[in-house]
Image: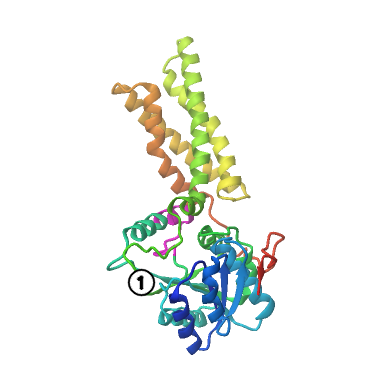
């Protein structure tokens, strides 16, 4: 078993962790992810206890993990598994052992050391995990208590799969989970201690805004496609309402809504299928989608009629209606229509695979 530790601006906690792991006879690969020169003394003291790889600049946690995995596949092919560990002291040696032991019993799965966020936990961390947990469940259809855990173990046969996953920074870990869902790799959750070394978790190098945007990319894609479709639907609704009103057409709002929805839902289906959920294939998905579209259209029309009847202007009522139905539409599409295909894991490296041409020993 090889312990992989991506390290950026580490402190003495890294040295303490390595010393404990050495006593347990783990092989260790540490990636210095572009730390400042004053941290070289730490890596120098560790060079006899672990394999140290150096990035010349800060590429990010995901790239550091890939660098270590590439090194292991080339120089330690005899090892049975890999466990990734954070360098900031949040992962205790006994929890690392528990995760590694679980891999022995579930070697076909991804093992996750999950925190329950009980006790004295920084508000930023508690809130961040709650949000990403909800987003992950919405985007994948899977429940996971701790989506941000860096303590993960898997067999070495999965290294090519892990190298093919996109992302160089914190989004890599979220993409790993989403790719596992898509390819049918299940996981086991192993409870671990929730450890923060200070009240504000200042040792973390997570940037709340930039890294959150990367992590939430999947949900943002869906929101983007839905927003574009909404704009199209809203423009068409207004055009048809104006045109049918000029013609003194009976109940122009009703028919304008139907015409606009028929056009926009076909456009939305294409976007979500190809660019958001990356789901290709059969006529059954199209049938399910347009069945959903019919149900949404019916609910949309009824709600729109109610809102306009009570005196809300049609243009405003249309916006209110779309917002109310948005979440329900996304949930049905993710969980019932664009379901990820299972058992499509690849054990071959793609042309996008990270190559270790950016580090030195």
Task: In this rendered view, identify the residue nearer to me: 361 or 347.
Answer: 361
Quarter of the image with the N terminus is bottom right
Q: In this view, does 27 lie above or below 313?
A: below
- Relative to 328, is 87 above or below? below
Q: Residue 154 in the image: x percent, y percent?
A: 55, 74
* Crowdedness near tag 1: few (<14), some (14–19) or many (≥20) residues, C-alpha within 10 Å: some
What x and y, as percent, mark residue 332? Answer: 45, 47
Residue 249 falls within the magenta-colored stretch: no
Count up the numbered dots.
1
User: Residue placed at 41% from the left, 18% from the top?
Assistant: 251
**Which residues are drawn in magenta?**
134-148
Quadrant in the picture for the C terminus? bottom right
Q: Which SS class for mark 1?
A: loop
| Residue 2 in sight in this render | no
> In the rendering, at what x and y percent does residue 60 appear?
55, 61
* Relative side of 122 to 172, left or right: left
Identify the residue at horizontal 42%, vertical 40% (top origin): 326
Answer yes or no: is residue 124 visible. Answer: yes
Q: Where is residue 192 in the image (x, y as percent from the top left)?
A: 38, 75
Name the residue that disc number 1 marks: 195
Is residue 146 inside the magenta stretch? yes
Residue at 62%, 63% in the rendered image: 344
């Amino acid at each position: 078993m090889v312990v992989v530790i991506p390290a950026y601006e580490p402190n003495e906690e890294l040295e303490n962790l390595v010393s404990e792991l050495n006593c347990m006879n783990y092989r260790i690969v540490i990636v210095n992810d572009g730390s400042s020169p004053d941290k070289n003394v730490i890596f120098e003291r560790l060079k006899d206890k672990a394999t140290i790889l150096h990035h010349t600049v800060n590429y990010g946690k995901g790239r550091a993990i890939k660098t270590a995995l590439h090194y292991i596949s080339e120089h330690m092919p005899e090892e049975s598994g890999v466990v990734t560990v954070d360098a900031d002291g949040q992962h205790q040696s006994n929890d690392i052992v528990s995760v590694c032991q679980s891999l022995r019993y579930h070697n076909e799965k991804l093992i996750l050391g999950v925190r329950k966020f009980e006790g004295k936990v920084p508000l930023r961390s508690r809130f961040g995990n709650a949000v990403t947990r909800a987003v992950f469940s919405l985007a994948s259809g899977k429940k996971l208590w701790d989506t941000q855990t860096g303590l993960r173990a898997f067999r070495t046969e999965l290294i090519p799969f892990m190298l093919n996953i996109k992302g160089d920074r914190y989004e890599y870990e979220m993409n790993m989970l989403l790719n596992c869902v898509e390819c049918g790799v299940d996981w086991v959750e192993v409870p671990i201690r929730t450890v923060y070394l200070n009240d504000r978790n200042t040792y973390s190098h997570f940037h709340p805004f930039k890294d959150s945007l990367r992590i939430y990319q999947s949900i943002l894609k869906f929101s983007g496609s839905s927003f574009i479709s909404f704009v199209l639907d809203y423009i068409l609704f207004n055009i048809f309402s104006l045109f049918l009103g000029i013609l003194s057409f009976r109940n122009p709002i009703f028919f304008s809504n139907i015409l606009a929805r028929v056009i926009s839902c076909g456009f939305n289906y294409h976007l979500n299928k190809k660019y958001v959920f990356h789901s290709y294939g059969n006529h059954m998905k199209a049938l399910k989608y347009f069945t959903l579209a019919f149900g949404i259209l019916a609910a949309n029309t009824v709600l729109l009629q109610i809102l306009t009847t009570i005196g809300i202007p049609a243009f405003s009522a249309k916006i209110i209606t779309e917002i109310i139905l948005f979440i329900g539409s996304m949930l049905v599409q993710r969980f019932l229509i664009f379901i990820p295909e299972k058992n499509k894991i690849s054990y071959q490296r793609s042309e996008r695979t990270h190559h270790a041409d950016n580090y030195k020993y």
